[in-house]
Image: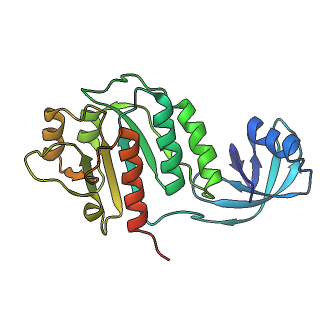
Amino acid sequence: MELFCASYFRDGIGHLGPEESNHCIRVLRHREGDMVEVIDGAGTLLHCRILAADPKDALVELVSFEEDWGGHPYELTMAVCPTKNNDRFEWFVEKATEFGVDAIVPVIGERSERKVYKPERAERIAVAATKQSLKARIPDIEEPVSVREFIETCAAETRLIACCFEGEQPRTSIREAVRGAKDIAVLIGPEGDFSPGEVALALRHGFVPVHLGASRLRTETAAVAAVAAVYFENLSL
């Protein structure tokens, strides 16, 4: 199945935008009257007919739709410190999107090597990964905030922090921590881990310290492992 992402949809008429239109019309050679599958980025699959085969701005007409297509039965926010090598963070964005994630928040910690992060490229990667994995909801790639700001404003019911050292209370397995949870936020630190002050702040705001097993994982690997743990906990066969 080839999916296209609508840049704009109103009153049953959608615009595919320049990049999607070029792929649809010039590369795949679709013509007026052809049926195509379009996602709105918010969770709905739209079965559409092409009205105008313009390679710069193709127009499509809604025929029918399926809500919550390719969705998952939980809300997951991943707050992850961007890695020094930007490719690794973008790899995490791609894989997290394939499993299923609702929001990705780049967070800057006291020990972060990367202090500035621009999300534009990650947004494009998330769109491509959403289509590739047959989903209709594109995760939000939010603007960077500090670790402390995220901790103080996070409203998820289940708040987890993956840290490498034992703090005021022992860490629990992330698989156990997400069991039965449906509104989850996971905070993943930089290669140098969170500072003691950040961990203490997280504990005061109801974050539960978790671990991801005995192996020492890179930031992006730990983040994907956390997403996978939530995915498999909710997997129904």
Tell me the quarter of the picture where residue 149 sits. top left
Front residue of this view, candidates 203 and 235 = 235
Seen at 31% across and 69% down, the residue is: 180
Residue at 92 percent of width and 50 percent of height: 31
Q: Position of residue 154 (x, y in %)?
A: 29, 45
Left/right placement of residue 6 relative to residue 161 reads right
Q: What residue sits 22% from the left and 43% below the top? A: 163
Q: Residue furthest left?
A: 168
**Residue 181 placed where, x, y %?**
31, 65
Where, quadrant-wise, is the N terminus in this rendering?
bottom right
Count every numbered label the image shows and give the total. Answer: 0
Residue 85 in the image, given as x and y percentages of width and height? 45, 27
Compared across the picture, whether 108 is left or right of 20 comes to left
Residue at the farthest right position:
32
Q: Which residue is most to the front? A: 215
Q: Name the side, left or right, on which 133 lies relative to 64.
A: left
Q: Is residue 205 above or below residue 71?
A: above
Is residue 3 rendered to the left or right of residue 146?
Answer: right
